[in-house]
Image (spheres, coloured by chain):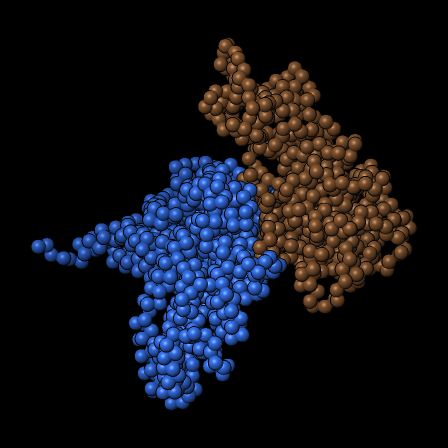
Chain colours: A blue, B brown
Amino acid sequence: MSQVTPTNLKQLTGRYLKYLPVLLALIIWFVLILKEQYYLRKVEDLSLFLFDRQFILDSFRNPGGFLGLVGAFLTQFLHIPWLGSLIWVALLLLAYHITVKSLSIPAAMAPLAMIPIALLVIGNMSLGYGVFIMREQDHFFSPVLGYMVSLIPLVATRRFNATWGKICILTVWAIAGFMAFGTYSLTGVLVAAFYTMMQNDSPGKVKIAMVISAIALVIIVPLVIYPAYTSYRLVDSWTAGLPTSSEDEWIRPVRTPFQLALLCQILLAWLSGLLSRMKSSDAKTLFIGCSAYIAVIAAVWGFWFKDELFHTELAMSHAVDNCDWGRTVSIFRDAVKSHEKSDARTYAARTRKIASAHSDDEIADIVDKYKNRFYEPTRTMILYRDLALLKTNRALDESFSMKNGSRLQKSRTQLSMALQSGKQLYLHYGLVNMCYRWCLEDAVEQGWSNSTIKYITMHAMTIGDYSLARKSINKLEKTLFYRKWADSQLALLSDTASISSNEPYKSILPYMCFEDMMSNDLMKSETFIINHFLGPQPSAATPEYDRAALLFAMHIQDIRRFWERLLYYVDSNDFKSLPRSVQEAAILYSSLEKRNNPLPLDDRIKESYDAFNRYVQSHPIRSMKESDYTYCQKYGKTFYYFYYFVRDLQTY
Amino acid sequence: MKHCFIISTALAFLVGCTGVPTQFTRLETPPTIFPDYTDVVIPSNIAPLNFRIEEKGDKYVTVITSGFGKTVIRGEKVIIPAKKWEELKKNGQMAVQVYVMGKSGWQGYRQFTITPSDVIDPYISYRVIMPSVECYERLSINQRNLTSFKEKVIYANQMVQNGKNGQCINCHHYRNYTTDNMQFHLRQYLGGTILVTDGQMHKINLKTDSTISAGVYPAWHPTHDYIAYSTNKTHQSIHTLDHNRIEVADEESDLILYDIKNGAVSIIENDSLKFECFPAWSPDGHMLYYVSADYDSPFDSERRDKVFLDSREIRYDIYRKPFDPETRTWGKSEPVFMASKDKLSATLPRVSPDGQWLLFSAAPYGIFHIWHRESELWIMNLKDGSARCAEELNSPEVESYHSWSSNGKWVLFSTRREDGAFTRLYLAHFNDDGSFSKPFALPQRDPDFNRSFMYSFNIPEFMIEPVHITPRQFASFISSTAATPSRYESKKGQ
């Protein structure tokens, strides 16, 4: 057995460090496949690449258009998450490798090249709700492609000894590259210049000429090229090609990681001379390498948007898109269930704190502090869940037996539901013109996407606007992964009578029984949907419509509207006995109004209500927030609990 | 099989040495092509009418013959070379023969004709816009050379706007088809009306304390330095189920006159019981045509909602008002076409350059007919007062904004006939007897363009020359210049 000495320990560590980037890439790939598949699908859903002349030409309307085109082309592979993420991870590895090689970074210092790569990862994976308002549809792939592209001038200039040759290359690159790759080409010019400047073998004159030329090119080229375009402001020239958002508040956070990655690249070029002189066996070098890895892993982990509610919403959205109503509900149920233990721990911790509290104010503070630690679904999740329950005629039995709430997004700004899930919810709740409206608004703000074209198709199919449906289908026929769906819609178009018997139309059309009205949602989708269903009763209301209307009347806890909608519901629906939650609401509301309940109720409902009242008397409520958990454990599946404890819901 | 056919007999070559089939089944119907250019009358200076053959087949041959000239084009996309096109047009009427190789061999469709006629103004301009409701991230006013496929941006909002500082651009308009005197509006960011007079740019704020808004729909006086505008408080609403999807209505609207030299705004019409809109001058500048609808509702906070509730009952009639440009005085308004009597709402009156004809849009109600599928173009003979729906121009979908060419021989109009959602531009020849020839789509280099382009073209206007000010000059001026306030003058005349 060989003896471990400090020297061979360093060698061993160095050898393993060499493979660490591959290992990290593999880990990232696995995480993406296991945890981020719906996020990746959403990125792809909100992007578009068409094998179409017009689409390709339109891509070149901004500097960086070619990069965007390639980025959009690759983004479509995220439709198969393992494949798209594999391509992305492979590109990250390649970017790392090219950085090390082109900047001649010694193996021991190579971990430093992981820093810009980590920033590229952070840029994509910290986005969260920002994904819904990204303006460039290539934003997932373009940064890594652009990062690699910006090393091209360095590789090219290293092949030339003559100063004029290097400067010529930089000039040609800056002009052509700016149009094709935007700001990444300008970064490349700086990287090449700074690298030359820091090389000992370069004469001083060459260094000065290169740096001055590079700075001049970076300033002048965008100014010269600007008049050829009419699609951006001059001040935006130096950020052309970088991802951006349609919302002001998001632009800086979205861009910063990518800008830092490019800055790191320039810094590495600047430090290249110093790095090349560092000895690989030096403990200091090893320390820097290890530190870089630790920092990279910590930063990626820290900035990765891991919010569970966001991921649950994405998974539910995907299931809704597939009209997989059972799965939509089970995702919701699983998400709630997975927090039961942590909720119990939170409750135990809170109880301990309360036990040691000295005043009511202190208790109230503790209750407030712990409020957000209990699991609570978002409104988007609730609407998805109720949609699925309504489509399967289970809503009035089950909606109030599941967790309700209105946890706000963990996001820089509360993104309006209209921008996130508006199109989808409107379509499936039968408000197809509102779906169309948000498709168009999204297309204006973020550009056309697979998602908007698909929804426009479905909107057009439901209202019988077949020429528009055909146009949209023709678009999707030019995609790689939506062709099949487009073909299925074409088949329906060839036999329009069959539309009403196929999903999603089969389950949307019954909701479209209302009379036309003029209205505007003012970006409040949930409020609009509720007001719509609780508006004037359609003369040809369907059982499905009346079920939804009754559900929303119960959700807003409006007693008068409950009775009103219940009458319509009873009138249009066939049932052996009233759904459980409806009975619970009826007995509760009758009691609150101090009148006899007019409906036939199951004995078990009466018993449950009596038991609830006894429990209230034996468990006095100091504050609703404080008693919430215990009551939820005991009566969380009843409408009584919902009525008393689920209050002040917020929508967005 | 939908076509009747006769088997032609020939034993010679299956396909001649030029690639043109000599043995084929002769069909008695013309081929289905997109855009539909069958049997159309076209301007003698128009760009090639490229089209796609929509018949199923393995091979396609198109033979275009005119005079002694002949061109053979293979493939389902018929892209006619510009030089050949010019030669063909010179020789008069073109006959187009399409052959398609199907499973049963070559089929020869009935020939159709393309007939060159009067020249057309060489330029048009339009706004390129997504048919959206409130967002306007990407808007531009573009000019297109009709004799070729060249299209250029006149001005685009993306050149100045950023993030929350969005800018809407609209209502480009030219005086007598020339571009040295033109205007367009900017709303919100850096807002104002960009007025170009004799090639010089100005930025004006047409809103005064005495008017309800800045100028909206413009009509530049043909001989004097006046521009008539409507002023509108316009709102949009969404139809929750109707196939028209969006409704646009005015809460208030009046007419004003802007005196360019004096920088003064005066009222033309501001009856509180009426909505007035869409001014248009007669060619001699002595008559202002406009539309007006009766509406009686209190000016309170509920008026806006009430307008939408009542929108199906709001109908506009066409009026005209005499004007003396020398003294800037107005005569009494008189009705021209009482559309409301026929349960119609007439908008966008445009008088032909010879002053004899009035082209307008009509739909069952409302003002903003681009969102009304029932909207159709109507033509009225101003000499005898007869009006008719121009059936030959219309389709089941929207026909709306329209312009006369400077020689009065062509009309350019917007329509959603292709897909019901995206506005496209169509041209039609206006015949001496007051009828129109078959309308046809503005030719595009790629015949699939209209199908794949996901933007609308609106406000099509003819121009006899291109706009000479560059987009950069506009952008720079807009960014650096504050709008000059206009002065309110009390009304003259009646």
Q: Where does the image place residue A551, in percent across and percent down from the top left?
A: 47, 67
Which residue is the extreme one toward the bottom? A358
Residue B487 seen in the current view: no
Q: Nearer the viewer, residue A481 or B220?
A: A481
Q: Nearer the viewer, residue B122 or A251?
A: B122
Q: Nearer the viewer, residue B213 or A567?
A: A567
Which residue is the extreme one toward the left? A1
Q: How many marks?
A: 0
Q: Where does the image place residue A42, in percent across and percent down from the top left?
A: 42, 53
Say which residue appears at 42% left-offset and 56% top-offset: A320
In which quadrant will I find the C terminus of chain B?
Answer: bottom right
Q: Where does the image place residue A169, in percent across and percent down from the top left?
A: 46, 38
Left or right: residue B330 compared with residue A557: right
Say which residue appears at 36% left-offset and 87% top-offset: A618
Left or right: residue A62 compared with residue A35: right
Left or right: residue A308 compared with residue B115: left
As displayed, is residue B388 above or below residue B190?
above
Left or right: residue B307 compared with residue A64: right
Q: Nearer the viewer, residue B431 or B395?
A: B395
Say which residue appears at 58% left-offset and 55% top-offset: B241
Q: Where does the image place residue A525, in percent across and percent down from the top left?
A: 52, 62
Q: Quadrant of residue B442?
A: top right
Say which residue appears at 71% left-offset and 56% top-offset: B313
Residue B10 seen in the current view: yes
